[in-house]
Amino acid sequence: MFSKLEFQIAFPPENLLALNLNMKSLLSFLFLITFGAIAFADIQSPPMADMGPTRKLGRGFSNLLFGVTELPLTLINVNDQYGNSAAFSYGLTKGIGRFIFRFGVGLYEVITFPAPLEQNSYRPPYRLNIPWKLGGFEEFPPELGFESRYNYCN
């Protein structure tokens, strides 16, 4: 069909080699760009990605239902720090106040869960419990009893 000379004129061997190298370089470059973009996108998750309307609704329901656990926990903490008489007076008052606050915030979060109101996000509307500062609240109410988060039955 074609003679060797006609084939070499139409497709010289050095052009084939250059085309092959350019194609390898292009594919390598596209491979690096694609996986580099995927790796870069993976680390670009926003810090508040976990805070959404469903978490706000769940936090609101847990504050409504389990906010009463603030009362015994506050009594125990004040008793450990200041003694029995402070636990009965100051601890009881502080526990009731924390329970009422949790109930109010829970009601607020259940009603407003679809809207990102707190700093245009779904953050809790109260100051979180920072260990080196007094006051503040955990995101969810405290747990009572001996519940464990570890699976010991492997």
Image (cartoon, rainbow, N blue to C red):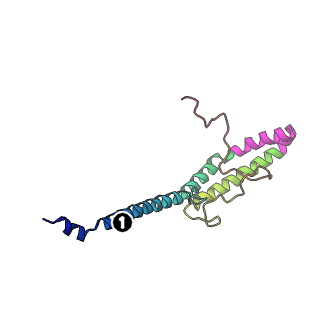
Q: Nearer the viewer, residue 142 or 4?
A: 4
Horizontal arrangement in the rendering, residue 84 relative to residue 58 (left or right) = right
Quadrant placement of the C terminus: top right
Quadrant placement of the N terminus: bottom left
67 above or below 28?
above
Asked if residue 86 is among those painted magenta in the image, a careful observer would answer yes
Q: Residue at x 73, y 41 (%)?
A: 72
- Chief secondary structure of the magenta span? helix
Callout 1, which amino acid?
Answer: Ala
User: What is the residue that sits farthest to the front in this orientation?
Assistant: 5
Magenta span of residues: 69-89
65 above or below 4?
above
Q: Nearer the viewer, residue 146 or 20?
A: 20
85 above or below 11?
above
Residue with the mark numbered 1? 18
Asked if residue 4 is among those painted magenta in the image, a careful observer would answer no
Local packing at callout 1 (Cα closer than 10 Å; few below 14, some 14-19, many 20+) is: few
Q: Position of residue 57 (x, y in %)?
A: 57, 55
How many numbered marks appear? 1
Q: Nearer the viewer, residue 67 or 134?
A: 134
